[in-house]
Amino acid sequence: MTSKEIREAFLSFFKNKSHDIVPSAPVVVKDDPTLMFTNAGMNQFKEIFLGETLPKHTRVTDTQRCLRVSGKHNDLEEVGIDTYHHTLFEMLGNWSFGDYFKKEAIAWAWELLTEVYQLDQDRLYVTIFEGDEKEGLERDSEAYDLWKSHVAEDRILLGNKKDNFWEMGETGPCGPCSEIHYDMRSDEEREAIRGQQLVNADDPQVIEIWNLVFMQFNRLKSGKLEPLPAKHVDTGMGFERLVRAIQGKTSNYDTDVFQPIIQFIAERAGITYGADEKTDIAMRVLSDHIRAVSFAIADGQLPSNNKAGYVIRRILRRAVRYAYTFLGFKTPFINELVPLLAKQFEGVFDELIQQQSFVQKVVLEEEVSFLRTLTTGIQRFENYIAEHSAIEGDFAFELFDTYGFPIDLTGLLAREKGLRVDMEGFQRALQQQKERSRAATAIDTGDWVTVSNGDETEFVGYDYLEATTQLLKYRKVTSKGKQQYQLILSVTPFYAEGGGQVGDSGWLISDANEKVYITDTKKENALIVHFVNELPPVLEGDFKAVVDKHKRLDTESNHSATHLLHAALRQVLGDHVDQKGSLVSPDILRFDVSHFAKITPEEQKQVEDIVNAKIRENIALKEERQVPYQEAIATGVRALFGEKYGDYVRVITFDDVFSKELCGGTHVRSTGQIGFFKIISESAVAAGVRRIEAITGSKAAAVIREQFELVDKMRELMNNPKDFVSTVEKVLNENHELKKAMENHIREKSLQMKKELEAKVEQVDGVNFLSLIVDLPSADAVKTLAYALKGALDNAFVVLGAEIDGKPNLTVMISDDLAKARGWNAGAIVKDLAKDIQGGGGGQPFFATAGGKLVEGLPKAIARAKDFVK
C-alpha cells in the first residue's frame, strides 16, 4: 500500500464505524496559553475533555499534523539521527466523547491492523497499565481481558505509570492507556531475542505504532484523581511509523513519505543516499525539517526571534547548516523542496499548495539571511582562534545561540584546527539558558473553585456592554511573582482577546456597589477568562459586568478599519495580498500582509484614499451569525489561513462587493464612526511580509493637530516666510555648505598637524614610532591624521590619543608590511591599551580604535604604547 492509500484506509475504516471525519487543526496554536504548537491529536478536542464544551459529534476521526521539538525522544538536535523521530508528523486518531470505550477501541484497532492493513500478528505486542500503589490505581484488568480475545497472553505486557498512564499535563484529564508495538526485526534477530524484551526499550526496530488512551480521571492541583463525568477514548497512531511497518522498511525515511524528497535532494547534491551516514543524516534532516517549517508558515507562523517564530527559525537554520556543511549547498536550496512537498499533500492538507508561492519565498529569504549569518559566524570563529588555544564553552554556546552553529559543527571546525572544545562549559551554558527560559514562562495555576452551578459562559458582547451575571468559578494564578485571579462568569459582555483584537477591560460590580477591575479578558480553549488582581469581597449573588466603553469603541474603530484596509490593499496591490497577522488595540492598528516589495508612498496614499472614501460613505455593518461554514465560503467570503473555523461562522460585511470576511471580533455599526484613517508607518516584518501601522478617529485627529502645530512653530522660527518649503531647502543647503567647510577645515588642520608630528617620530628597533595625544575634535579627524602619517612613513607604528566630546579615544595605525612581518595586530594592541581608559575596541591588523570612560588614563595608555615595539 502507498502512504496515500494507508491514510485513506484509516479514515474510511472509522467512517464506516459511524465516525465523522474532521479536518486537521492548524499546527500553530492560538487560543491555548499552555501550547505553542499542536503536539498531539487530542489538542483540538482539549476543551471537550476538560468539560468546557459539549461535543458536536460523539465519534470523530482525523489525521492531525503535529509538531514536537522538545521532550522525550524529540530533541530537535536528535531528529534525523535515528530512523523514527520527527519534528512534524501526522497523528491518525479515532475519538469517542462519552460514547464507546475500551471494548470497541481495542477490537477496532486489532481489526484495522490485522485485517485491513494485514500486519503480521506474530510481530504485534500490546501493553496495559500495571497499576500504581502510590496513586491507589489498580491494574487495568478490563483492558487485559479484552486483549486476551485477540492476542496470546504472553504478548500482553504490563507497563508502568510512565509508559501506560497518559496525562495531558500536571493537571487535567488522564487515564490508563494501551500501546500497540510492532517488531520490525529480521526472523533471525527475533529468534535470538524475543520481542517482549525490547518493547519500550528504545530499540529502533521494535516501536510503538498506536496508543489507545482511556480517559476516565481528572487530576487536581493537589495530585488527587477524581472520576470524569464521562469516559472518553483518545487514540493516536504515528502515520510515518505505520507506513514503515506496512511497507516493511527499517526506517521511516525509507518509505514513500520521505523518499521522493530525499531522492530529489540526493540528485541535486550529486550524492547517493545510503552511501555515507553523514550525508544520509543531512538528507533526512532536510526532508523532515522542510515539513515542519512549511506547514508552520502556511498556518500563520512566520520565522522570528521570539517564541514560536524562533522555534521555526531554529528548525530551518538547522536544515541550512546540514545542507551547507554536509551536502555542499552554499547557496539557497531548501526552498526548492516546497513545491514537491505541497504536491505530496494535495488533497490532504491543501493549506500548503494554496500558499505554495508565499511559503517558498519566505523560506528562500530566511535561507539567504542565515547563509550570511553562517558566514559571519565562521569568520567569528576564525577571529576567535587567532587569540585562543582552545574553544571555551561560553564561546561555543555563543556560536550555537547567536549564529545557529550546532555543537558538532563547532567541534568539526575545532578539530580541523587541532583545538579542543570545552564541552562541559558548553553544556553548562546551555542548561543555564534552559533554566532561564523555564523560569520566564513558569506559571503556577491552581484548581478551579466552584462558586455557582453552570458550565458555559453566554457571550453577549456583540449587542451589549453591560450584563447581569454570576461568578461560576475562579482560580489563582501566579506568574513571574505576580498573583492574579481568573474568573468565569455565567454571562459576559467582555470580548476575549482573539483574531488580533485585544481583550476588553472594565468592572465587576456587586449589588453592594463593590467594584473589582477586570484588567484583561482572554480565551483559554472554550473558556472566556476574566483577569482580576483581587477577588470580590462576596463571591455569591448577582454582579453587573461593565465593559470600558471608550476603550471598546476605539478598538472597534480600528478593527473595522483593518477590514477596509485589507480590501483596499488587495485593490491597489493585487489579489495575492493576504492577511498574515494583526493587532487591534484602542490606540493603534497593526496589519501584516503578504507582499514582496515595499509599499510605496504613492500606493499608501491610494490605500488611504480608498479607506477614507469608504468611511465617508458611512456603510452600515452587515453582520451574519451562525452561518454554515461552507455556505459562507461559497459566497466568496475571505477566510484566513491558520485559523480553525467551526461548522458555523460569523460573517462581517462592509459593502458586499468591497469587504466580506469571517471574523469573531467586534465592529462599528457603520464606517462613519471610524472618523478618519491615517497610515503612520510601513515596514518589513519578515521575508515577504509587510507591516502597516495606522490610526483612526480621535488618535488620527490628534496626530494631524500635532503636525500642524509643528509646522506652525517652524514657520515662526523662520519668520513666517511665504514659500516655506523653499526657505527650509535654503537653510538645509546653507547648513550642508557650512558642515562641508568645517570638515575641510578639520582635514586641513589634520594635514598641517601631520607635518609637525613627523618631526617627533622616534626610531625604535627599525620602526618609525609615534605615540602622543592630539587636539582634534572628531574620530574622523584622528583617522585622517593616522592615515596621512601612514602614507608619509615607512614601517610606521602610530598611536594617537584624543579627547572627543569629553570621552577618551585611542587610535592605532601600523604599516601593512610591518604588521605582517612582526605579527602585530592593531586590534589586539588597542584592546590592551584601552584598559587604561576603562574601555574597549578593536579593528583590523593594521588599523583599530577604542573608546572609554576615563580621560585621565590617556597619558598612561600613550606611554605604554612603546612597550609593544621594544
Image: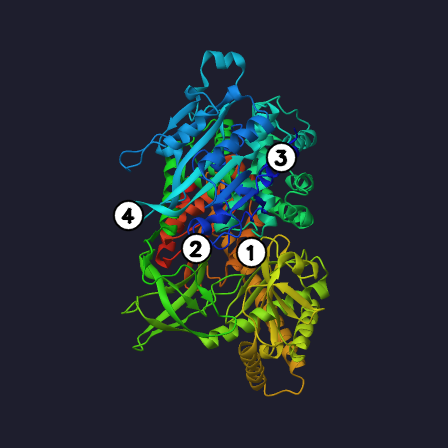
Who comes first in sequence, dot 3 or dot 2?
3
Q: Amino acid at mark 2?
A: Glu
| Helix, strand or loop under label 1 | helix
Q: Position of residue 666 (x, y in %)?
A: 54, 69
Gap between marks 1 and 2 measured at Cα:
72 Å
Please give left or right for residue 199 compared with residue 570 in the image.
left
Please give left or right for residue 65 compared with residue 857 in the image.
right
Image quarter where the C terminus lies is top left
Q: Which mark is residue 52?
A: 2
Q: Which mark is residue 222?
A: 4
State how many labels appear.
Answer: 4
Q: Which mark is residue 784?
A: 1
Q: Position of residue 475 (x, y in %)?
A: 33, 58
Mark 3, residue position: 9
Q: Amino acid at mark 3?
A: Ala
Please give left or right for residue 758 compared with residue 683 in the image.
left
Gap between marks 4 and 2 measured at Cα:
21 Å
